Image (tube, rainbow, N blue to C red):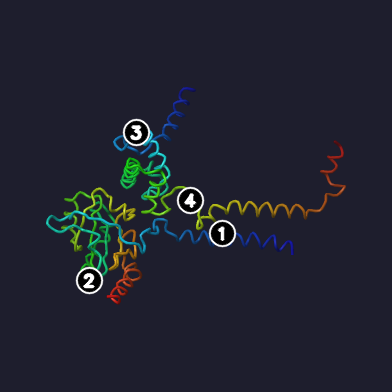
Amino acid sequence: MMRKFLIVVFLLFGAGLAHAVLPEEMLNDPGQEARAREISQGLRCLVCQNQSIDDSNAPLAKDLRIIVRERITAGDTNEQVMGYVVNRYGNYVLLKPPFQLDTALLWLLPFILMLVALGAAYFYLRQQPEPEAGDISNEILKEE
Amino acid sequence: MQLRMATVLPVGLFAVMGVVLAMGLRHDPKVLPSMLLDRPLPEFDLAPLKAGSPNLKSAELQGKGLTLVNVFGSWCVSCRYEHPLLMRISKDKRFTLVGIDWKDVPEDGLQYLSTYGDPYALIGKDEAGRTAIDLGVSGAPETFVVDAKGRVRLRVPGPLSPEIWDKQIEPLIKESEKAS
């Protein structure tokens, strides 16, 4: 029983490790290959829009993976490689949108909403009348 | 007054959210803004699909009035859907229609055109898909309208339709006719 369970667990985790990168695409230098993987995981596949190019089997994703590796071999920094792709496809290809003027609302809205909620809660609680003497909660407090 | 605020505010917020989400439903996530709008067409020099015809060069699209660059492939289903429209507009003398055969086997591309007709003045082949990536193509078919100065004026992802033609491309043709 335990053994079967472990096998299932291993299979499930193994599924998460599967990537679309083919052996022939990989760079010989493990350091460069690691950078290529890191960059491709942050780039959106334009065909299946919620996958990264690292995960996608689409031919366009493969072309982009090869370009990422070519730029790295040509001596580009990670930012330059990202810039190369963004220049062609726009910020949309970045799975994590950058923080800039037109995305400020996207990044800041959760914090703004949180402040609004905290403010509302503060004023609401302050307006609550003081508990009266006959209140049950006060009775309990007295007993203790 | 307190009670009114407590009822009006949530209903108001709900209404605002409803409107925003309804707008989101109408927004097609496949239609992305092009990075190339009003920028020069990236440089390319593609070998011809048809042996004997000249290369398709970005530099040569300049100074010749309006050009429509259509990215297609024999493997692409929506291209077939778009094809009759391309055949119809190919007779129009107000612009030049050129094609980029994207990630295709050249023989298949030629076969496709001999079966369905060839609307293009010139066809370059992009087997490696490099030019398509320079253009920011995300899928075929895709059409770029390039003006006489070599700037991209419009990108249409997906098949052209009579509606897109009348609303988006026809005004650009009119504008280019006035300019020349």
Residue lying furthest left: B52
**Foreground residue, A2 or A82?**
A82
Q: Are marks 2 and 3 in contact (CB under 8 Å)?
A: no
Q: Is residue A87 above or below residue B145?
A: above
Determine which residue is flagged by label 3: A29
* Mark 3 and mark 1: Cα distance apart in space: 50 Å
Do callouts 1 and 4 mark residues in contact (Cβ within 8 Å)? Answer: no
Q: Which residue is mark 4?
A: A98
The x, y position of residue A72, in whole percent, is 35, 41
Earlier along the polypeptide chain: callout 2 or callout 1?
A: 1
Please check whether the numbered discs 2 and 3 fall on a single chain.
no
Please report, as a chain letter, where disc 1 is located.
Answer: B
Residue at mark 1: B17
- B75 relative to A56 in the view: left or right: left
Give the CA distance from mark 1 to mark 4: 25 Å
Q: Position of residue A112 (x, y in %)?
A: 61, 54
